[in-house]
Amino acid sequence: MERAHIGSLAQLGSEVQVLRWLRQQTAEHFPVGARMQVSPEQAQFLAWLVKVTSSRKALELGVFTGYSALSVALVSCHSLFPNNLAFGTFAISTVHALSQC
């Protein structure tokens, strides 16, 4: 792995405010299910993979509250790593779908 790619992982930095808020809301509203959410470090790693591979398209199958999806989408908005990412998500959960009605 090139040093530039290793350094870019460190440049992603810590968890941004909107992700912290979403993680906290998930823990509050879904205390048992919150363990399904990826950790901040895992989300940063996913975002880093999108950046270093110059991904143009991504699809997330199985979305809980959107933490990892938002992490990946935010890398496209980051001023250091613009890549015009087309991103989609797909999830079917009658439990979570019904709780939103």
Image (spheres, rainbow, N blue to C red):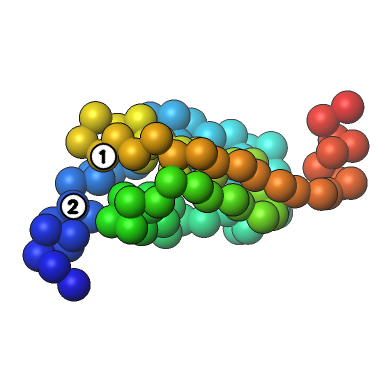
Q: Position of residue 86 (x, y in %)?
A: 51, 39
Q: Nearer the viewer, mark 2 or mark 1?
A: 1
Q: Residue at x 17, y 62 (%)?
A: 6
Amino acid at circle 1: Phe
Q: Residue at x 18, y 72 (%)?
A: 1
Q: Quadrant of residue 75?
A: top left
As drawn, 58 above or below 70: below
Looking at the image, do the residues carrying marks 2 and 1 touch, with CB atoms under 8 Å apart? yes
Q: Quadrant of residue 35?
A: bottom right
Amino acid at circle 2: Ser
Q: What numbered label is drawn on residue 65?
A: none
Q: Determine whether the residue tagged by mark 1 lies in a helix, strand or loop.
A: loop
Q: Relative to the observer, which residue lies in front, 26 or 89?
A: 89
Determine whether, in the image, residue 100 is placed left or right of residue 85: right
Q: Which residue is mark 1?
A: 81
Determine whether, in the image, residue 24 is placed left or right of residue 99: left
As drawn, 55 above or below 6: above
Q: Relative to the observer, which residue lies in front, 53 or 77?
A: 53
As drawn, 3 above or below 8: below
Q: Earlier in the sequence, mark 2 or mark 1?
A: 2
Q: What numbered label is drawn on residue 8?
A: 2
